[in-house]
Image (cartoon, grey):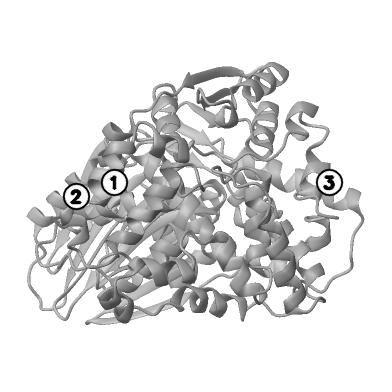
Amino acid sequence: MCGICGVLNFNGEKAEESLLRQMSSALVHRGPDALGYYVQGNVGFGHRRLSIIDLATGNQPLHNEEKTAWLIMNGEIYNFRQLRTELEKKGHIFRTKTDAEVIVHLYEEHGVECLQYLRGMFAFAIWDEEEKQLFIARDRLGKKPLVYWQDKDRFIFASELRALLEAPYIEREVDNQALNLYLSFLYIPAPWTMFKKVKKLPPAHYLLIRNNDLRMKRYWNLQFGFKQRRKGVDDYKQGLIEQLDEAVRMRLVSDVPLGVRRIVKINSSAIVALMSRHCRNPVKTFSVGFSNALYNELRFARILSRDLKTEHHELMVRPNAIEILPEIVRHYGEPFADCSCIPTYYLAQFAAQTVKVALTGDGGDESFAGYYRYTAAQAAELFDIFPRFLILGMYSLVKWLPNSDDVRTLSWQIKRFFKSLHLPPQQRYLDWIATFTHSDKAELYDNGFADAVDLNHDLEFRAALYRQNQGIGFAESAMKVDIQTYLPYDLLVKMDIATMAHSLEARSPFLDHRFMEYAAMIPFDLKLHHFTSKYILKKALSELLPPAIMHRGKQGFAIPIGEWVRGQLHDYVRDILLDAVTAGRGYFKRQYIRSLLKEHMEHKTDNGYKIWTLLMLELWHREFLD
């Protein structure tokens, strides 16, 4: 795992090594073990290395035999040994034993089609001296990041925004439409970033840049709704275990210690069980807990550790949010309001003290309908037969349920479900997942800012993805859209930033693209079966995991944010959100923010996530713009 950066000057000017050094320095946490450069005429690369495979000779940039193709890569290629054997049979000569070197030789053989052979996580760049062409690509699911900026004179790219911003000619101007998307989703999806003209390369895409001409193309798409003969449950169970076991085994190749983070979920617990089959020594496992019982998972971690005989490490977190928030904001480089970034950050910090590679369970919920919102989407279809006035009448009755000041309570969830039930499926699903809905934004936005953005952009953004999903039901379509949005731009960003901040590599067997392709072929009614989520996955794993893990309710990796806002963050939040500097940005109505705070502090409702989202936005402004 590494950090990469590069410059291509279209105007013929020599690439500035001093700029590459500055950008590389901003990425030192991603690769503290080695530093490398390639500068030739108008093109230059910088590379920071976290040594995982071939510790002695695997430094980058790497090149082909004739030194006409130069590579920098962030990530891991899990099938590199098989690829290397095939390439050596064709006469290619390898200088190292690292996985990255197979890419440059594959490029010699297949050009951009080399992507079809790679099984892993990656963001890489290849400079082709003969073609005078820069080739940049990201992995299929978006596990490894890449951002870029272009004007008429130059093209610049990096693993992180703060490295890119070392270039003095990149203006730090806010993209209002990206801000609008952030308030809906808690994150900013590709291709947008919070900065105008700075873009994210979307997952499963590559760029070809030559003579100021930039061409982007998608090279892979996960397909659902296959028309094939339906298999029996036992066949799917066996297939899932075989596919997942292979994905786990491939991710155990490492020349440094490895373990598993957050073992209390079914997904990561399954990884531990399968790892135990292939490891001689007990698997190292890691969990963190909180004093609030609703958010504490350590009891379940101990059960699994005892059952699978792991070498377990746990940490009770008593976070000082005010102290850690500026550090988190700096690492993300743009506003990011998934509050689970805090426990994820602490867990990565804790695990990095013992191991250099950690396997995770990310991806299982997206492939097997593991979120309650898919169950809600399926349940909502039962109400679609009723006229709109009757559904609105149901909501008027539901509103009489007791008020709740915690989003996790059943009454709060029921009210949210019925509040949007009368809307078309795409709109109500967006209302369920949005932090600020359209009606919220109408009250929040200052008149001038409201005129500067398209309030329907979040709905249109997802609608374009829904239109690609022909022949499948809405709940399954929503799951696929989440794989294209929530997974890469929230969950995988959170994991990448937290682990790389502590020079820790994360590997996710559930995100193996072949495993996901197999899962996509399984009928949706076996994933969400009679309102039971992850049905077929649970069936497959039932013989691997203890009943206490298999039957526990779903619990997100969250923090008691509503409680924090009323407690340790009370004065901090009020001072920042009601500050004259914050109000002077011209985005929001100050009175609406006062109302949000007042309702929350008086326990009338839970506005914790809204307040947190606004706080992270303002802290980002103070870190990167002021």
Q: Quadrant of residue 452?
A: bottom left
Tags 2 and 1 in contact by the CB under 8 Å rule? yes
Residue 254: tell me if it is visible: no
Mark 1 residue element: helix
Would you place residue 485 above or below residue 162 in this image?
Answer: below
Q: Which residue is mark 2?
A: 623
Q: Residue at x 73, y 78 (%)?
A: 388
Q: Quadrant of residue 92?
A: bottom left
Measure the C-alpha gap from mark 1 to mark 3.
44 Å
Closer to the camera, 397 or 111?
397
Give left or right: position of 366 versus 59. Answer: right
Q: Which residue is mark 3?
A: 238
Could you tell me which quadrant the N terminus lies in?
A: top left
Closer to the camera, 206 or 382?
382
Give left or right: position of 117 versus 280. Answer: left
Few, some or many C-alpha atoms within 10 Å of disc 3 (few <14, some 14-19, many ≥20)?
few
Would you place residue 346 above or below residue 497 in this image?
Answer: above
| Place of residue 320 in the rendered image (x, y in percent of width and height, measured from the top left) | 33, 28
Residue 329 image label: 1
Few, some or many C-alpha atoms within 10 Å of disc 1 (few <14, some 14-19, many ≥20)?
many
Measure the C-alpha gap from mark 2 to mark 1.
8 Å
| Place of residue 65 in the rendered image (x, y in percent of width and height, measured from the top left) | 32, 58
Q: Kindly identify the amino acid type of the residue bearing the numbered disc 3.
A: Gln
Few, some or many C-alpha atoms within 10 Å of disc 2 (few <14, some 14-19, many ≥20)?
some
Q: Kindly identify the amino acid type of the residue bearing the numbered disc 2.
A: Glu
Measure the C-alpha gap from mark 3 to mark 2.
51 Å
Closer to the camera, 40 or 211?
211
Give left or right: position of 240 versus 621. Answer: right
Tags 3 and 2 in contact by the CB under 8 Å rule? no
Residue 428 image label: none
Mark 2 residue element: helix
